[in-house]
């Protein structure tokens, strides 16, 4: 990977000075340690889902402006985010669960007349 990146800039590892080599080596070490795994994504999705659920539970369904009740748009956006996280979580589980989540998401699309 490093050779490909250096090649894009018409450089070779041997052409770099010691400070540049040390910097690039530390960057490569950091990249290798932070590899993305399916389990890491699952963990991230669970945390994000819990965050949205908490925020959604604290949002009122309607907001009051003067004497009028209006729909709380933030509530709608949070529900959309939660649905997206559920869909992603479904794709990361089993293929059957992913198919079920996709079918539910498509079923919730507005019908065209």
Image (spheres, rainbow, N blue to C red):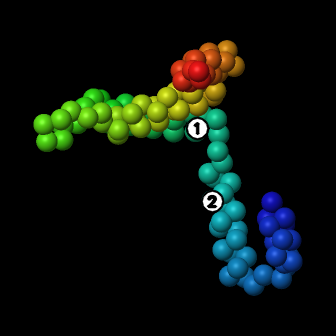
Q: For mark 2, what is the residue?
A: 30
Residue 10 percent across, percent down from the top left: 86, 77
Residue 1 percent across, percent down from the top left: 80, 60
Residue 18 percent across, percent down from the top left: 72, 82
Q: For mark 1, what is the residue?
A: 41
Of marks 2 and 1, the one in the foreground: 1
Quarter of the picture holding the C terminus: top right
Task: Give the answer, above or below, for where 110 lies relative to 2.
Answer: above
| Secondary element at tag 1 | helix
Q: Which residue sits furthest front?
A: 113
Q: Is residue 82 visible?
A: yes
| Crowd tier of the residue under label 1, counting other residues whose Cα lies within 10 Å: few below 14, some 14–19, many 20 or above | some
Residue positioned 69% across, 62% down in the render: 28
| Secondary element at tag 2 | helix
- Image check: 60 left or right of 90? left
Residue positioned 68% across, 82% down in the render: 19
Q: Is residue 46 visible?
A: no
Q: Nearer the viewer, residue 25 or 58?
A: 58
Image mark count: 2
Residue positioned 65% across, 67% down in the render: 26
- Image check: 69 left or right of 85? left
Residue 11 percent across, percent down from the top left: 84, 78
Task: Give the answer, above or below, for where 54 lies relative to 109.
Answer: below
Task: Give the answer, above or below, for where 113 lies relative to 26.
Answer: above
- Image check: 58 left or right of 93? left
- Image check: 80 left or right of 10? left
């Amino acid at each position: 990977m490093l050779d490909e990146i250096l090649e894009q800039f018409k450089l070779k590892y041997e052409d770099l000075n010691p400070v540049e080599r040390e910097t690039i080596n530390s960057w490569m070490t950091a990249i290798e340690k932070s590899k993305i795994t399916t389990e890491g994504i699952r963990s991230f999705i669970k945390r994000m889902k819990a965050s949205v659920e908490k925020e959604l539970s604290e949002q009122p369904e309607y907001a009051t402006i003067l004497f009028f009740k209006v729909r709380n748009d933030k509530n709608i956006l949070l529900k959309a985010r939660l649905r997206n996280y559920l869909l992603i979580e479904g794709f990361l589980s089993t293929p059957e669960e992913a198919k079920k989540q996709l079918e539910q998401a498509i079923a919730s699309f507005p019908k065209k007349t």
